Image (cartoon, helix red, strand yellow):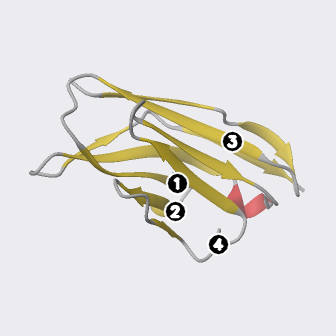
Amino acid sequence: QVQLVESGGGLVQAGGSLRLSCAASGTIHSINVMGWYRQAPGKQRELVAQVSSGGTATYATFVMGRFTISRDNAKNTVNLQMSSLKPEDTAVYFCNIVVGPYRYVYWGQGTQVSVSS
């Protein structure tokens, strides 16, 4: 069974920074993609950033230049460094991984990020 444990959310003022971390544990043969999604109240869950096993990162346009995603394949962890935060970044952030040849998808429980103006 695969588990994702997230940490690092919290309350920050606009312009501030936060770092989210996610650790995957359990029987994991290979993680293809690791990423972060977010969901604001009343809105659909959306992709924030993801990184392939080879290290190629992609970002949503609304975070480009402000957020940086990184992963440690040896530790099965993925981090999201968030800078220049805006009130519209307020959401629950979810860690996501895609595993194995059949591309099973796993989600973390979510961590709240709140940005005050």
Image coordinates of residue 74 in percent, x first then y, are: 39, 33
In the rendered image, which residue does mark 2 sit on?
43
Image coordinates of residue 101 in percent, x first then y, are: 10, 51
In the rendered image, which residue does mark 1 sit on?
39
The residue lying at 47 percent from left, 63 percent from top is 46
In the rendered image, which residue does mark 4 sit on?
64
Label 2 CA crowd tier, 10 Å (few <14, some 14–19, many 20+): few
Tell me which amino acid carries mark 1. Gln
Given contact means CB atoms under 8 Å apart, are the residues at marks 1 and 2 in contact? Answer: yes
Q: Tell me the SS state at disc 3.
A: strand
The residue lying at 22 percent from left, 31 percent from top is 28
Left or right of residue 39, residue 35 in this image: left
Tell me which amino acid carries mark 3. Arg
Q: Indicate which disc, 2 or 3, sits on the residue closer to the N terminus.
A: 3
45 or 96, which is in the foreground?
Answer: 96
Left or right of residue 11, residue 104 in this image: left
Q: Quadrant of the N terminus?
A: top left
In the rendered image, which residue does mark 3 sit on?
19
Q: Indicate which disc, 3 or 4, sits on the residue closer to the N terminus.
A: 3
